[in-house]
Image (spheres, rainbow, N blue to C red):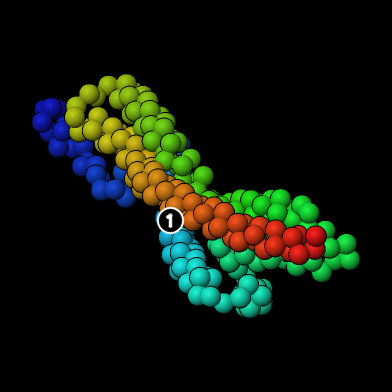
Amino acid sequence: MNPADAMQAIPAPDMTLLGLFLQAHFVVKVVMLGLLGASVWCWSIIVDKTLLFRRTKAEMDAFEEAFWSGRSLEELYRSFNDRPAVGQGALFVAAMREWKRSFEGSGRQIQSLSQRIDKVLDVTIQREVERLESRLLFLASIGSAGPYIGLFGTVWGIMTAFTSIAASKNTSLAVVAPGIAEALFATAIGLFAAIPAVLAYNKLQATVSKQQSRLEGFADEFSAILSRQIDERLSLAA
């Protein structure tokens, strides 16, 4: 048979994205599906965290406006104690609860109240940061491991392609190109999952750092306010 006729007899491979997936080796398909699933999960985390950070920022702004409006601490405590508080509101409620327990108890132990309030504020800040950072580690993991997982699929696909070429003893481009394209498609999916994950992780982590700085700044200011009141009560008691 004429080589040209033999080339025409070879059916044209399906080079669409779906075709590349369907023609890929089983292991490569598993890698592709895993990376696509990870990409979908990453985007769900990105959207959820973006909305969460916006709500948290709005609630923090609203609390700061109420806190510095001149209202008494008792009035603010009654207002925020009856509803779930986040951000500075959570710090305020936790510190005020410790304050009220110290003065309403039978012992009225206020000698070390300032230290206890500082510890309560530190623990609450840690909990708030953990709430904001939850699931961000998954983005970092996909961002770092995604390209390597895709590369594994590529290497496996190329090995399979070369094995098929050796078995068919045909090194024409029409035979080689589909297998190589299927293998490289796995790397492309790995980058598709990893690049948004890395960019989103850096952006979201920077937002967490900003909000953590706001929490720590408010904790220092509120601790100083309560410390002055403690000193005044101790001086009156003396």
Say if 73 sits above or below 133 in the image: below
* Along the viewing direction, whichever of 157 and 122 lies nearer the viewer: 122
The reply to whether residue 29 is in sight is: no
Q: Which residue is rendered at x = 58% and y = 66% of the image? A: 89
> In what quadrant of the picture does the C terminus appear?
bottom right
Give x and y (percent) for residue 95: 67, 61
> In what quadrant of the picture does the N terminus appear?
top left
* Along the viewing direction, whichever of 129 and 21 lies nearer the viewer: 129
Give the image quarter of residue 105: bottom right
Q: Residues within 10 Å of mark 1 (few under 14, many from 20)?
A: many
Q: Which residue is rendered at x = 45% and y = 36% of the image? A: 145
Element marked by disc 1 = helix
The three-letter code of the residue at mark 1 reads Ile
Q: Residue tagged by mark 1?
A: 46
* Along the viewing direction, whichever of 178 and 166 lies nearer the viewer: 178
Give x and y (percent) for residue 39: 42, 50
Numbered disc total: 1
Give x and y (percent) for residue 170: 24, 24
Give x and y (percent) for residue 3: 13, 27
Q: Which residue is rendered at x = 28% and y = 32% of the image? A: 180
Say if 4 sits above or below 96 in the image: above
* Along the viewing direction, whichever of 57 and 221 lies nearer the viewer: 221
Q: Which residue is rendered at x = 64% and y = 60% of the image? A: 228
Say if 32 sits above or below 230 in the image: above
**Relative side of 180 to 30, left or right:** left
Give the image quarter of residue 234: bottom right
The reply to whether residue 184 is in sight is: yes
**Relative side of 153 to 79, left or right:** left
